[in-house]
Image: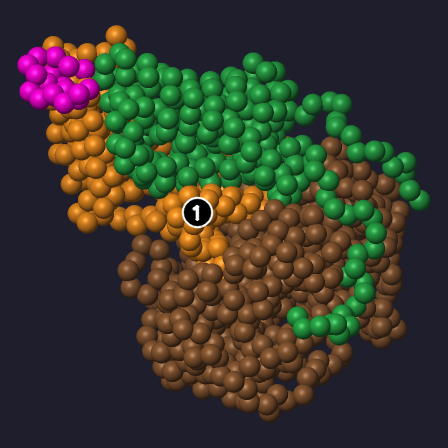
Chain colours: A brown, B green, C orange
Amino acid sequence: MTSERAGGGARVLARGWGWRHAGRSRWAVRDIDLDIRPGERVLLLGASGAGKSTLMQAIAGVLGGDDEGDSSGTLTVDGLHPGAARDRVAMVLQDPDSQVVMARLGDDVAFGCENAGIPAAEIWPRVEAALRDVGLDLPLSTPTSALSGGQKQRLALAGAIAMRPRLLLLDEPTANLDPAGVDEVRDAVERLCHDSEATVLIVEHRVAVWASVVDRVIVLDEAGGILAEGDPDDVLDDRKAELDAAGIWVPGSSSARIRPAAEEGETLLTARSLSVGRTPFGSRTAQVAASGVEFATQRGRALAVTGPNGAGKSTVALTVAGLLRPVDGILEAAGPFRRGLPAEPSRWRSRQLVTRIGTVFQDPEHQFVRSTVRDELAVGPRAAGVDRHAADARVDELLARLRLARLAAANPFTLSGGEKRRLSVATAIATRPDLLVLDEPTFGQDARTWRELAALLSELLDAGHAVMAVTHDDAFVHALADDVLTLPGAAARVETSVRGHTHAVGGQPCAVEATR
Amino acid sequence: MHATIAATSTPARRVYRWRVVDIIVAAVIGVASGVIFWAWGLAWTPLSAALTFLGPGAAGLLAGGWLFAGVVGGLIIRKPGAALFTEIVAGVVEMLIGNEWGYTNFIWAAIEGAAAEIAFAILLYRVWNLGGALFAGALAGLSTGLLDTTFTSLAALDAAQRWLYIGTAVLSGVVIAGLLGWLAVRGLAATGALSRFAAGRRTRVVDDGAVSDDRAGAPTGSAGSV
Amino acid sequence: MSVVLTPDIRSSRIAGISPVAKLGAALLISLTLVLTIDWVSASVALLLEAMLLPFAGVPARQFWLRTAPVWVAAAAAAIATALYGADSGAVLWRLGPVTVTQGSLSLAGAIALRVLAIGIPGVILFATSDPTDLADGLAQLVHLPARFVLGALAALRLLGLFIDDWRALGQARRARGVGDGGGPLGAVHRLGSRSFALLVLSLRRGNKLATAMEAKGFGGTMRRTWARKARFTGRDVAMVCLGAGIAACATTAAVLAGSWSFVVS
């Protein structure tokens, strides 16, 4: 059952349009000439830094007024200035958590309608229709905090649909989602495109996912203007090399294995019948996320941890990194690795941990502790007791190696996404730890950063480090992993219950398979 | 075609209407401050007990812990009502999480916020430097000193202690709310989290227009070990 | 924190009452009792509240858990007042600046009762209120500006993410080598650094939330409608009257007993 749509789609017209944020010297986007016809489905591509999000926000009319930046050229939606056309435009953004406004599901979907001045009697039928359209079949009083990432994005989409927009903007809606979530959102958008006449504009760098949904592809050039536009297949075939270089995930580019099969190496950490879990706030007993886990990390070999959402992968990674206490079972560091410390990494002091195990978190921003990139890189070595001179030398080496030298004096929070990821990896390897644990290192990264990361990890492995990576990314596993640990997980999702957390039930032991 | 590229400049006309981002950021500061207030409130009992060797009036030194929300909100948003709104939100959140002062948190926060608001108003909503912050902190401290010594259990103390409390509350307001608040805003501005505000724009982002190194593609092999 | 945002509201009589009415009742009680320090008004109020407590429908365990800080604060305030309060009457014990007199003891008792009489209804009424309903009530019934009320409500939702962020920040610091050590000064520094990082993360989320809300049409010039209608029914009026009644009884009793003493003197 579909909901009706207000007639037609909106037309977006841009002539020589550009925007520069206040306080910056560089134009975020410039020389944009666009003509998006009513009812078209367009995929907007471009390298990171090409200004796609800025363009989307400008079309949505939320960029801010004259005091927030300078604009050049013209940009209109249905002939109106975007600020005046806001009632016909709806946008879905990238971060699932930051888009949820209300505490209850129904209220959140109704929010947009309330702002549009729609009479109360009409709102709730629209809410229910929108939820059906995106496939969220949950009671209206479901707490939004209990939803998964994919569900939250679908919720945002429902909120947008309920407003019956003439123009729907999707700014990287699947960037922070696991594969299952990506499919959910994509299917919902595909249904929407099928049922309505609204113009849809999507920004993504995962082209394969969306190529069948859109009619047209526009590629923004990092240096300004439009790099290419046209039929998806044509653009992707003709300009493949340029797109690849810009970091776009062109479908069909192979994710070949980038290193030869590794040999057995010295064992660093072994786990036997390990159970991991976290203690929720306000409770004393840990909630088990995965049990019966067995593996051994070895020098020169990469262990990939995979499994469905909620299977406890991150919990395993944090436990191995010594940041969480194991709930049960044995996690043991080998003699030469622990060098006189207790067997369990969670018992080590912070300073001892940093020289043995390096951790790269899913969100790089969690790791920043200083106000300049240089200081940030120096934290690990200084904590490990390295003297100032040697620490500075190490920092310089890392800055050069990871191409962060230009940013040495910048505040870590002001870096771009790819730069933050590089910095977080650099800080983890600064102390030359034997084992490197990474939690979803390729999440939301474009192809360029992905390749750099894979190359960097490959070098580390060749140099004799051990790597353990939690990942959803099959290409990553295929390219790098020597061993794969698959956590079964119950993949329990909040489809029927109103409250409660998802927890995987480990029943059967999780065995490691070697990939070669 | 390019329009004439104007140098980025401060707007000639002052905008007093609150944008959505103003409301949300003020509310977020309020919520974060509310949590800190709550934690401070928990620590208050043992800390003030420790201070009682100086006299229970010395507990005023801790008063500033509840005052910085308004000062920080005012310094960031820079519009009328900022200090008041931020403190009220902080007070409501403190109350929601729950502590012994219950609904009165809300009233105290409103009055303390109003005091900071009055300070900024006296400065005609133009002075947002350290001096302005200290002044707002001082007024907020004064208001809390007067409130507490009149209406809470402190009213049962003798006059000398009450004056000590008011004095230490003002001092606490100046140092914790004013000075630390101003430093916090500067620190936040440096992280780029305030880029949509005037407070966050004095620091330029490091992008000199050069093409970023990201274009170089996959890295070549390294010279030495990593 | 789900305990804040979707509290465990039992279907008791009091849960169905508009949060605005509950706020009004609690405010009336607090504001009236705060004007005086005497044991008559406080104890009368406390007695009346205790009689009404069973009707609130809050389970015993929840009650004690949530009002625990109030009890602790009452005890702490009583002790402080006993030791340092305004002295009158016979001196019972003296040690340096500390004097315990009959007067200060009776004051201490009055203070303790007052803290309880003000604190407990506040906590209980909040334990049965939903923030979204409160926001609806404040915007529709009390006519506070909708943008501010809803903005605050949206930001309040981010509270739930604080705990996860806080933990992640702590884990990250441990992984970076700065998780422990440095003595108490180091601990204070770490606390400050961690809180600052939490603030930065929250602000970034706030910026994104503001963009998302604005994209949903929030804050525009269009007059907004309300999907959930806030009503002020007879029961809500009764609640406010109850609060007023308690305040009135307590004050009258104190005045009649001659013990009502205005704080500003």
Rendered view: A262 above or below C237: below
Q: Which residue is mark 1?
A: C186
Position of C261 with respect to C19 (left or right) is left
Position of B90 with respect to A204 (left or right) is left
State which region is magenta: C86-104
SS of the residue under disc 1: helix
Position of C186 with respect to C68 (left or right) is right
Front residue of this view, candidates C127 and B105? B105
Rendered view: C107 above or below C1: above
Q: Any magenta on residue A364?
A: no
Position of A81 with respect to C69 (left or right) is right
The answer to whether residue C251 is visible is no
Which residue lies at the image location 22% right of the left edge and 41% below the top edge? Answer: C68
Mark 1 Cα shell of 10 Å, populated few (<14), some (14-19), many (≥20): some
Which residue lies at the image location 85% right of the left edge and 34% below the top edge? Answer: B6
Q: x, y (%) of residue C86?
A: 18, 15
